[in-house]
């Protein structure tokens, strides 16, 4: 094998390792404040999305999630799947200062109110960029002992309701 080919293979492996490390959620010593406001450095992992940003943090006891949408409508996160189907969905928006929030279960390409895991805390807010949703859960609800990945889907829409079609969605698998 030539030196150029070996270099190309090694370089490719380094790129794959770097891409994987970018979506790695390590255990942190502290949890963010769930107040509907995201502060720089509050979350241990930040992932840029086409129309917003996903923030994640995990301690031994708590999984915290925040979404900053660039839109003024609803934001949502589904846990347990990279697709809506079978995901535990948490969706909300702010309407004239009032927080509207629902817990739902994904069924096919839709979702309905359901008794999915109750967040320990949830807050919604709005800022100059768009809508914010912050949630926290007992880590064991979605990160069972020995898990190496967290599957989720993030979405946002342009309207203040729980039923309009998403303007952005992204399924993700986060390394733990």
Image (spheres, grey):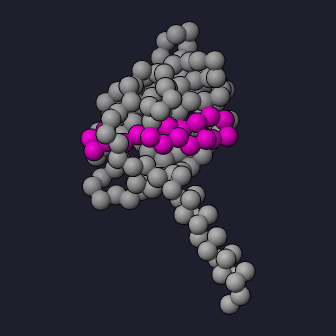
Q: Position of residue 132 (x, y in %)?
A: 53, 25
What residue is at 30 percent from the left and 59 percent from the top? 146
Q: How many marks?
A: 0
Magenta highlight range = 44-62
Between 133 and 158, the one lying in front of the other is: 133
The answer to whether residue 88 of the structure is visible from this angle is yes
| Horizontal arrangement in the rendering, residue 83 relative to residue 28 (left or right) | right
- Toward the bottom, the furthest residue is 1
Query: What is the quadrant of the C terminus in the image?
Result: bottom left
Asked whether residue 149 is drawn in magenta, I would say no
What residue is at 48 percent from the left and 21 percent from the top? 37
Asked whether residue 45 is drawn in magenta, I would say yes
- Toward the front, the furthest residue is 3
Q: Position of residue 72 (x, y in %)?
A: 63, 22
| Horizontal arrangement in the rendering, residue 74 relative to residue 143 (left or right) | right
Looking at the image, residue 28 lies above or below residue 10: above
Between 145 and 159, the one lying in front of the other is: 145
What residue is at 72 percent from the left and 80 percent from the top? 4
């Amino acid at each position: 094998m030539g030196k150029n080919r070996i270099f190309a293979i090694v370089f490719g492996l380094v790129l794959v390792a770097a891409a994987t490390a970018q979506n790695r959620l390590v255990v942190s010593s502290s949890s963010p404040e769930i107040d509907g406001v995201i502060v720089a450095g509050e979350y241990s992992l930040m992932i840029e999305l086409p129309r917003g940003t996903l923030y994640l943090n995990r301690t031994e006891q708590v999984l915290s999630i925040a979404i900053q949408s660039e839109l003024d409508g609803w934001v949502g996160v589904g846990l347990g799947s990279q697709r809506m189907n079978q995901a535990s969905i948490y969706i909300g928006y702010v309407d004239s200062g009032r927080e509207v929030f629902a817990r739902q279960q994904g069924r096919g390409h839709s979702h309905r109110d359901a008794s999915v895991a109750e967040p320990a805390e949830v807050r919604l807010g709005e800022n100059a960029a768009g809508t914010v949703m912050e949630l926290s859960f007992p880590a064991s609800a979605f990160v069972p002992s020995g898990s190496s990945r967290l599957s989720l889907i993030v979405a946002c829409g342009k309207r203040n309701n729980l039923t309009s079609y998403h303007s952005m969605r992204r399924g993700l698998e986060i390394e733990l």
